[in-house]
Every structure is written in structure tokens, then in C-alpha cells.
């Protein structure tokens, strides 16, 4: 079935694939399966794929949740990708390029890539969309970025959630909206791929900072200030990269940021909590197998901010805490004692505002 036909379907049909079987990938595959699609789910670990097939449970990343019988777990990437017209990418940012490059070998015809991964590649400072353009410069594909406040454990339990799907064309965004929207999962369209991907990536860094603040016992005032100034930093970089500043007040900006900075299910906030309580990054990473995307994204965002000459003081302090051993309290002091600034001008530059007397 051509992916354009998804717009016209009365009932779900056709086979698609989800690439990546972490908690979020498994959740999205389950959502699509419940909706009536046949879904190939690529699982990196062969032993997990076999257990998954037998028990219908991803015991490694989403234990306790039996998923749709329409999901076909497979560790064969060719099997997952070949003859599909819609591919959902949900792999960690540090392996995104290698997986995408392998997928290109098996893609034929015009395909729609829907990317639900979040991060910025360390070596190239590219977003997921930039990576796809890099590995497939002549590829005949359309692209959608999905992001928003959506913990996997809540979505798989059918708790009402909403996200943004930003496409390279209005039609691509509309396809993603139609495919993913259900009675408990609502998708809003956008054409700001840059803004949606950037918001989804950088919010993890601010969540680490919020976790550090909570771990230090600094209270609600400090957390609220970090969230608010954090969205200012994200907006500042986004505007420099050509994003629509209004995107950052939406689901993929402020919505995702608030959830990740305050929710107990947030891996990035949890990592920050541990840092604030005195653990080292090495100790934290050794204690878990799940990926806190904000760690590697901090490296790349720090270099990107320098390249673009964007002032991002919260990002800068998180970088020094993570990778240079700076005491979190020292980082806090440096944030609070910076030169005093105007709130709006420091975020967006000079804006002419009419006044009435």
C-alpha cells in the first residue's frame, strides 16, 4: 500500500515497521497493533526477540505489559525494513546513524520515515533528520519528527497523551497524525521539523539540571526557574537554527520539558537526582542499562552552542558537572551570579513592544 493511501483508509491496513524495541519503540508498536496494523518490530538483542515472540512481553525494557498479537518481533533488520512504505525509527541517538545506514540498503520506493528518537549526534552535531539526509542523500523519502510529553509506561497503559508530528510536507505530517491518533493518543501536526527535534533533544539536558536541583534539595522555586529559563535557552538556539519560536511553547517544547523535569519516570531527571545526591556519572551509568539521552546530547549541544555562538548557561553548567567534575553547588553559584539581564531580550533579542498609557 502506498503511504499516501493511509490518508484515505477507513480502517487500518498494511504492514509497517518499528525500528527499535526499547520501552518507547515497544509502546508505539503496541499502539499500532491495537489499532489494527501488522507491525514488524526490530529488536537488537536476538535472545530478547525470541522471548518476546513466545511471551508477547518485552521483559527487558517494558516488563509486565503484554502487547498486541499483531506485533512480529524480529532481530533481522532486512525482514523488518523490506517492502515497507512506513518506518518508525525509535533507536538511541548514539546508534541512529549506523542503523539508518543499514536500513538504506533494504528500502525501495518512496518511504515515509517517522522518527521518535531524540538526540543530537556527537560527531556531526546533526539531528535525526540531518542523519537521514546524510546517509541517504539521493533517497526518495519523506520525513516526520514525533515528540511530546509521553512516558512509555503511561501510553502503553492508555493514559491520555498528546504529541506533535512535524513533517517535511503537510501530507507527511497528516499521514503520521492519522496513523498514530487513537482514543488515548492524540497527534497534532506541524511543519517545524527543526524546532520539534531540537525541543525533544535539549529538554533532556534541562531535566538533568532539574534533577540536580531536586537532589540538592533546592525546592520548587529553583525547579520552576530552571524550567522557565531552560525553555528560553532552547528557544534561543532554535531561533538561531531557523525554528519557529512558537514551537517551543507547544507540546514538543514546554510540554515535554515540564514532564521530563518533574515526572518520576524521567530517566534524565533521575540521573540528575543522583548527581545532586553525590553520585558520580560513572557510578550512575554503571548501575543501569537504560539510556538517559541527555548525557550524550549534552556533549553535542555544548559544541553546537559554541559553533553557533548561542549563550546557554544552564547547558554549560550541566556539561561541566557531567564531564569535568564540577561540584553541582558551584555550578548553581555561577548561574546565580551571572551578569544581570533583561528577561525577554536575553532570550529573543530586542523586540519592539507597544505601550499604552
Image (spheres, grey):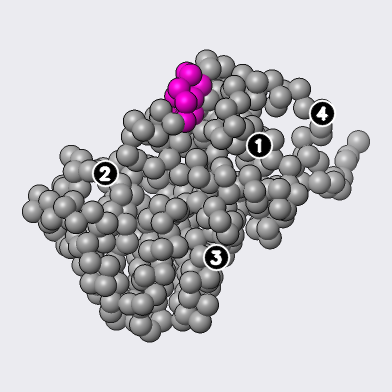
Residue 30 sits above or below residue 39 on the image: above
- Give the main secondary structure of the magenta stretch: helix
Q: Which residues are magenta?
A: 270-281
Residue at the bottom extreme of this rendering: 109
Pointers 1 and 2 in contact (CB under 8 A)?
no
Can you give x and y, in whole percent of width and height, for residue 173 in the image?
47, 67
Residue at the right extreme of this rendering: 357
Residue 316, which numbered label? 1
Secondary structure beneath disc 4? Answer: loop
Q: Quadrant of residue 126?
A: bottom right
Q: Residue at x 36, y 70 (%)?
A: 102
**Residue bearing the label numbered 4:** 339
Q: Residue at x 33, y 77 (%)?
A: 106
**Residue bearing the label numbered 2:** 61
Earlier sequence position, callout 3 versus callout 2 = 2
Residue 284 relative to residue 83: left or right: right
Earlier sequence position, callout 4 versus callout 3 = 3
**Residue bearing the label numbered 3:** 130
Earlier sequence position, callout 1 versus callout 4 = 1
Amino acid at each position: 500500500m502506498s503511504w499516501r493511501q493511509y490518508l484515505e483508509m477507513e480502517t487500518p491496513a498494511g504492514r509497517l515497521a518499528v525500528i527499535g524495541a526499547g520501552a518507547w519503540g515497544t509502546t508505539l508498536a503496541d499502539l499500532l497493533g491495537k489499532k489494527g496494523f501488522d507491525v514488524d518490530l526490530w529488536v537488537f538483542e536476538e535472545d530478547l526477540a525470541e522471548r518476546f515472540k513466545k511471551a508477547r512481553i518485552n521483559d527487558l525494557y517494558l516488563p509486565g505489559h503484554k502487547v498486541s498479537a499483531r506485533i512480529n518481533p524480529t532481530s533481522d533488520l532486512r525482514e523488518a525494513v523490506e517492502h515497507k512504505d512506513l518506518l518508525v525509527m525509535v533507536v538511541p541517538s548514539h546508534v541512529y546513524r549506523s542503523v539508518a545506514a543499514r536500513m538504506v540498503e533494504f528500502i525501495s520506493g518512496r518511504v515515509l520515515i517517522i522518527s521518535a528518537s531524540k538526540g543530537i549526534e556527537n560527531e556531526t552535531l546533526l539531528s535525526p533528520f540531518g542523519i537521514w539526509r546524510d546517509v541517504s542523500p539521493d533517497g526518495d523519502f519523506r520525513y516526520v519528527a514525533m515528540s511530546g510529553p509521553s512516558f512509555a509506561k503511561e501510553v502503553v497503559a492508555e493514559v491520555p497523551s498528546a504529541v506533535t508530528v512535524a513533517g517535511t510536507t503537510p501530507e507527511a505530517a497528516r499521514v503520521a497524525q492519522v496513523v498514530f491518533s487513537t482514543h488515548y493518543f492524540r497527534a497534532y501536526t506541524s511543519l517545524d521539523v527543526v524546532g520539534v527535534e531540537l525541543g525533544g533533544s535539549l529538554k533532556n539536558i534541562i531535566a538533568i539540571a532539574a534533577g540536580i536541583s531536586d537532589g540538592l534539595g533546592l525546592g520548587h522555586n529553583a525547579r520552576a526557574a530552571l524550567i522557565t529559563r531552560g525553555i528560553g535557552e532552547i528557544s534561543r538556539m532554535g531561533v538561531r537554527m531557523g525554528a519557529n519560536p512558537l514551537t517551543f511553547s507547544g507540546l514538543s517544547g514546554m510540554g515535554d520539558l515540564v514532564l521530563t523535569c518533574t515526572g518520576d519516570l524521567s530517566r534524565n531527571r533521575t540521573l540528575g537526582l543522583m548527581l545532586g545526591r553525590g553520585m558520580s556519572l560513572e557510578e550512575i551509568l554503571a548501575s543501569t542499562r537504560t539510556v538517559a539521552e541527555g548525557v550524550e546530547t549534552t556533549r553535542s549541544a555544548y559544541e553546537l552552542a559554541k559553533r553557533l555562538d548561542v549563550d546557554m548557561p544552564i547547558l554549560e553548567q550541566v556539561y561541566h558537572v557531567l564531564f569535568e567534575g564540577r561540584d553541582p553547588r558551584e555550578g548553581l553559584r555561577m548561574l546565580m551570579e551571572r551578569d544581570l539581564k533583561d528577561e525577554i531580550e536575553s532570550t529573543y533579542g530586542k523586540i519592539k513592544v507597544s505601550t499604552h498609557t
